[in-house]
Image (tube, rainbow, N blue to C red):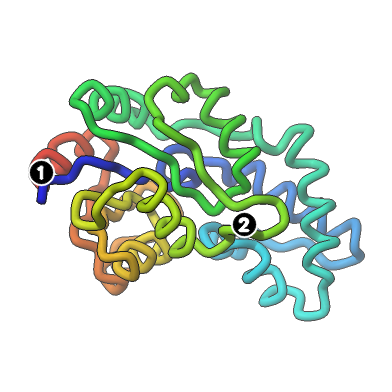
């Protein structure tokens, strides 16, 4: 069955929000009396929901309290400390013009994801922007992707998940969809291949050609 619906990850796939995420995490840690983390540790955290990963860094942390502090700074300034990957906007626009249904499937809370997509002028190309609610509903990407397949009425074999981390690829496999890994974000080639990506590309300009080849 040809691919008709594209589900894009956000951080590490569409945009680079590393600076904002790093600063907001350390803002939260400092407010709770914990030592700050370095950039390498932050990079390893990006992808899975913070509800799962923060306690690996500081096992005794109150995760919900940390998230409250994180969101204070993120709401005010962190979401703006963000850049699009070069060429990704043109590729998304071309995919939209070619008739693909495009939706965002991210682990970033939906309210922030919507704001970011609007900020970069990409909302016109997306049929929907989807992520977890602040209470944790749809924190797990496989559950969110399953929900979206039903929401859009898309057979799994007609969908493609595009992302930079193994969680994106695993979510696709668990839902019977195909997956395309990208290496310009926070993951790496070995991680994506080990997770079982159906394909891997190294630059946004390759998106349209690679997706057409699947079609």
Q: Which mark is residue 89?
A: none
- Which quadrant does the C terminus fall into? top left
Residue 96 sits in quarter:
top left
Residue 136 sits in quarter:
bottom right
Q: Secondary structure at mark 2?
A: helix
- Classify mark 1: residues with Cα within 10 Å, few (<14), some (14-19) or many (20+): few
- Residue 148 sits above or below residue 141 on the image: above
Q: Which mark is residue 215?
A: 1
Q: Which residue is found at the position 62% from the left and 57% from the top?
A: 39
- Residue 150 sits above or below residue 189 on the image: above
Left or right, 158 with respect to 20, comes to left
Q: Which residue is found at the position 57% from the left and 23% from the top?
A: 119
Closest to the camera, between mark 1 and mark 2, is: 1
Q: Which residue is found at the position 71% from the left and 63% from the top?
A: 37
Q: Secondary structure at mark 1?
A: loop
Count of numbered tags: 2
Q: Which residue is found at the position 53% from the left and 64% from the top?
A: 140
Write down the residue under mark 2. Answer: 39
């Amino acid at each position: 069955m040809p691919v008709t619906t594209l589900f894009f990850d956000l951080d590490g796939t569409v945009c680079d929000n590393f600076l904002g995420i790093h600063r907001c995490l350390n803002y939260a840690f400092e407010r709770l009396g914990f030592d700050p983390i370095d950039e390498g540790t932050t990079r390893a955290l990006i992808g899975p929901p913070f509800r799962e990963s923060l306690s690996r860094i500081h096992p005794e942390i109150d995760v919900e309290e940390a998230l409250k502090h994180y969101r204070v700074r993120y709401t005010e300034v962190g979401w703006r400390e963000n850049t699009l990957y070069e060429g990704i906007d043109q590729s998304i626009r071309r995919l939209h013009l070619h008739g693909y249904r495009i939706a965002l499937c991210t682990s970033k809370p939906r309210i922030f994801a919507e704001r970011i997509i609007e900020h970069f002028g990409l909302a016109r190309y997306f049929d929907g922007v989807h992520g977890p609610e602040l209470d944790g509903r749809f924190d797990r990407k496989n559950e969110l992707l399953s929900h979206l397949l039903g929401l859009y009425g898309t057979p799994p074999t007609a969908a493609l998940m595009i992302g930079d981390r193994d969680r994106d690829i695993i979510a696709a496999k668990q839902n019977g969809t195909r997956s395309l890994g990208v290496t310009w974000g926070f993951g790496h080639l070995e991680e994506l291949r080990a997770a079982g990506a159906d394909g891997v590309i190294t630059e946004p300009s390759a998106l349209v050609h690679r997706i057409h080849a699947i079609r």
